[in-house]
Amino acid sequence: MPERDQATTIWRNARLATLAPTAPGLGIVEHGAVVASGDRIVFAGPETEAPDAARVIDCVGRWITPALIDCHTHLVYAGNRAREFELRLAGASYADIARAGGGIFSTVRATRQASVDDLVAEALPRLDALIAEGVGMVEIKSGYGLDLESERRMLAAARRLGRERAVAVRATFLGAHALPPEFDHDRAAYVTLVADTMLPRLAAEGLVDAVDGFCEGIAFTREEMRHVFAAARKLGLPVKLHAEQLSNTGGATLAAEFGALSADHLEHVDEAGVAAMARAGVVATLLPGAYYTLPESRPPPIALFRRHGVAMAVSTDCNPGTSPLTSLLLALNMAATLFRLTVEECLAGATRNAARALGLDRELGTLEAGKRADLAIWDIEHPAELVYRIAYNPLYARIWGGR
């Protein structure tokens, strides 16, 4: 027997949903254990095969899954848009509100006036709500500043959130979120500013992990987004895209052209777009909170994603206007109820496929040796409870980096 590593911990007497891609279904191990050394998993499988560890934690039959991953959020912003919620209840559409100067622009005005401290203070309760449900990784987009200094403050706030809480944060630059009012008569100048000035400077400051954009009739065209994505490619940054949310603009095929990590929303994507995503390995990130809140009547084409083998992630899309949702567990229930995803698809969507949507599938998202020891331990009888229950949090403990 090799000498026992004093840095190791074993969580024994557990049931595992490993979500390993090589295992059938959820990768269930009924009498299982997870062993970590430092911040890495060194074993996940039957307890009878587990190595010894210095520290032993008895899970008393509880379930262990990978920690959840929220792979599409707009968590950092100032103010709220409760008034617009009332307007939508009275019949106004998302596009109507945006054209009247509301929507994203009302949040832009509030965010431009906020300091980094203000943004962090407002975002922390939202982040804490996600952490309390077993989230170990969250992606946070900018996009409510729409000028260099405001976007910088948003991304700096995202970075600080990752230092102030035991959670990993990926910061995504979303300068191409909307056309700011000061550029109403010169779209090309703003796109050039985003691609050729804002993005290089913010990337040079270490504030950008990925680049996103909103390809839509009320936002940016394919050609405009191509300019931004080409700039990201020069900097070696991965891209993502808000695509086909309100109409089919060909955003999914653009995402495929640039080998995007993900295309997100996708209610209006056609089969050609789905096929292009499949060929390029682009993840479809489903955002049922926005579908529910707007509300929409056309769900993403789940059957097409299944037919073409497109991986599906599920996220909160936490944002002030169209998805004020800070519960990834509720997003899973919505994905099952509104989009008819299976339990397996939902749980893979918030773990394995969410990691892939961030380009982190070699690090996170499954219980496998070599992966980071980010675990969620649940007081449940079956993993389906994580999708089935509404407004109920069965988290027993969250382990982040082995701690």
Image (tube, rainbow, N blue to C red):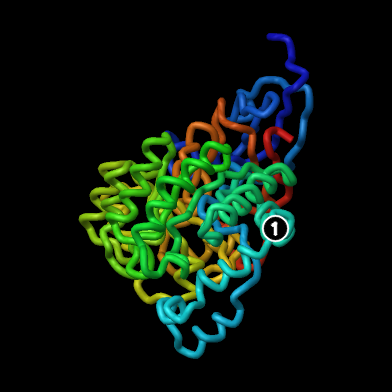
Classify mark 1: residues with Cα within 10 Å, few (<14), some (14-19) or many (20+).
some
**In the image as oriented, which residue stretches furthest toward the left?**
272
In the image, residue 237 above or below residue 241? above
Residue 63 position, x and y percent, is 64, 45
Q: Nearer the viewer, residue 395 or 322?
A: 322
Q: Nearer the viewer, residue 96 or 228?
A: 228
- Where residue 119 sits, quadrant-wise, is bottom right
Quarter of the image containing the N terminus?
top right
The answer, for residue 231, to whether it is visible in the render is yes
At numbered mark 1, what does the secondary structure look like: helix, strand or loop?
loop
Q: Residue at x 73, y 28 (%)?
A: 9
Q: Nearer the viewer, residue 275 or 96?
A: 96
Q: How many numbered dots are placed on residues in this image?
A: 1
- Where residue 338 sits, quadrant-wise, is bottom left
Query: Is 279 on the left-hand or right-hand side of 243?
Result: left
**In the image as oriented, which residue stretches furthest toward the bottom?**
90
Residue holding disc 1: 115
Query: Is 238 on the left-hand or right-hand side of 293?
Result: left
Residue 374 position, x and y percent, is 64, 38
Query: Is 188 on the left-hand or right-hand side of 177?
Result: left
Q: Residue at x 69, y 48 (%)?
A: 161
In the image, residue 53 above or below residue 180? above
Q: Residue at x 40, y 41 (%)?
A: 232
The answer, for residue 394, to whether it is visible in the render is no
Quarter of the image containing the C terminus?
top right
Residue 128 position, x and y percent, is 71, 55
- Where residue 185 sits, quadrant-wise, is bottom left
Q: Amino acid at mark 1?
A: Ser
Residue 67 position, x and y percent, is 61, 44
